[in-house]
Amino acid sequence: MARKYTLVSIVTWQHFSLHMTILRGRARGVGAAFAAGLCAAVFLALCAATAVRPADALAATSAPPSLPVAAAAILDRPTGRFIFLLNANTERPMASTTKIMTAKVVLDSGVSLDKLVVVGTMHLASDESEVGLKAGEKLTVDQLLQALLVASANDAARTLAVAVGGTEQAFVARMNATAVSLGLKHTHFENPHGLDTPGHYSTARDLSRLAWVELKDPRFAGLVRMTSVVLPNPSGQGQERFPSTDTFMLEHHGWVYGVKTGHTDQAGSCLVSAGTYKGEQMIVTVLGAPDPGQRDQALLALYKYGASLYKTWRSPAAGATAATAAVPYSTTPVALRLQGGFSTSVPPGARVTSTLSAPRTVTLPVTAGAPMGTLTYKVDGEQRGRSRLTAARSVPLPDWQTRLRYRVWSTWHDSKATGNWLQRGWRHVTDAFRAAGRWFSNVF
């Protein structure tokens, strides 16, 4: 029968603390329970001793950088945990970062990306971002999504809204319903493109969470990492290329893969960004920067600061005893050792769990180094790695004398199995002999 131990580490801002929950059946006998508990305690002590070392942690910044933005947030993408917030729950205009939700509603609608859409008549303001779509022009949903997310085209947003929702108003109702379903409590939409209007707002936290959800859709993730989009010329002659509006991604394309820019007079310069900086996957959002240049500088500073907050969690090294297993016909258990150590980078506050799956009792014979189970590591419920367990020593098949001695010994010591009748009987015999001895002494 297999048993499981769950070892839990909680990573805090200043230190690591280690707790354990043991999930297992009752051990067979006091000795087995004591040995397993003692081994788990020793393993926990090793985990606590090796959880964080100064050399393991990235050099942490003492304080967050000074930022020329109204609001900001950093989200650890693997866990979905926020590791930095600045006015992140303050509702404010969010400009074209709105189009993250526009794309989500389109992609979730089930419409085919190959479907041809006829562009309707639109009246755009002279300063609106657009790709020059003309009434009667035909483009696929995929092409319109590229224009929406890469070139930040308002005409594409309006066209998709009508194509999917029937009217812009009906489409916006879907956007708000989706926001409610995602728990975005400080977000409300009035249009699909993001132009300033009363009642159209979001927060750095909500936008980061929305991007985190939508980046799990490979279609969306593929669109937002594009550096340009090529669309057919409305005249029908040739094509036209539009670069991405995400200047930060274009400058750091080796490690940044999206997501969406935005700019209006009221919103300022905004950007929801996703990237892997120094191995750490983060979503960084800034709202209300004075201009794209300062916005991009703030983003880079936040990526650097965010990376400095991560710590390295380490398991005990290879060879450490993680558990013991009972050996048939023996009172000495066999140690189960880690075949290899494990380390992973974790954000502040993350919960590290190590689930050990191993047999309660080994099957004889056992060869030293034979596989005996696994230790699975998770960070906030997401699996990060696994270590194999191996037997520390060989155990041969016992001969008949060994089996007989063990049966006699275990029967004598197992008071629950015998109901203490052996022990009580032996005491009665010894008492009888003592009484007989006293009688003979008195008589003779």
Image (cartoon, rainbow, N blue to C red):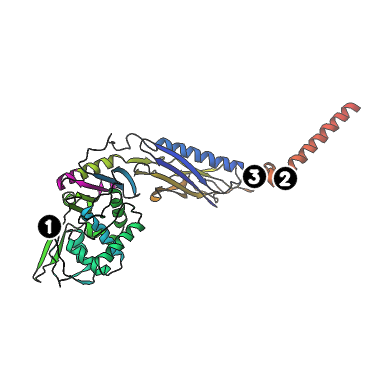
Element at label 1: loop
Give how far across and how far down residue 109 sits, in percent: 30, 66
Tag 2 near tag 1, CB within 8 Å: no
Q: Earlier in the sequence, mark 3 or mark 2?
A: 3
Give how far across and how far down residue 368 sits, in percent: 48, 46
Task: Spot the residue most to the right.
Answer: 443
Which of the 4 image quadrants contains residue 33?
A: top right
- Amino acid on which disc 2 is placed: Gly
Residue 369 visible in the picture: no
- Amino acid on which disc 1 is placed: Asp
Residue 44 lies within the magenta run: no
**Residue 22 relative to residue 306: left or right:** right
Question: For mark 3, what is the residue?
Answer: 406
Q: Nearer the viewer, mark 3 or mark 1?
A: 1
The magenta-colored residue range is 275-297
Residue 350 visible in the picture: yes
The disc placed on residue 127 is 1
The disc placed on residue 390 is none
- Residue situated in front as seen by the camera: 360 or 301: 301
- Amino acid on which disc 3 is placed: Tyr
Mark 1 crowdedness (10 Å alpha carbons): few <14, some 14-19, many ≥20: few
Q: Earlier in the sequence, mark 2 or mark 1?
A: 1
Tag 3 near tag 2, CB within 8 Å: no
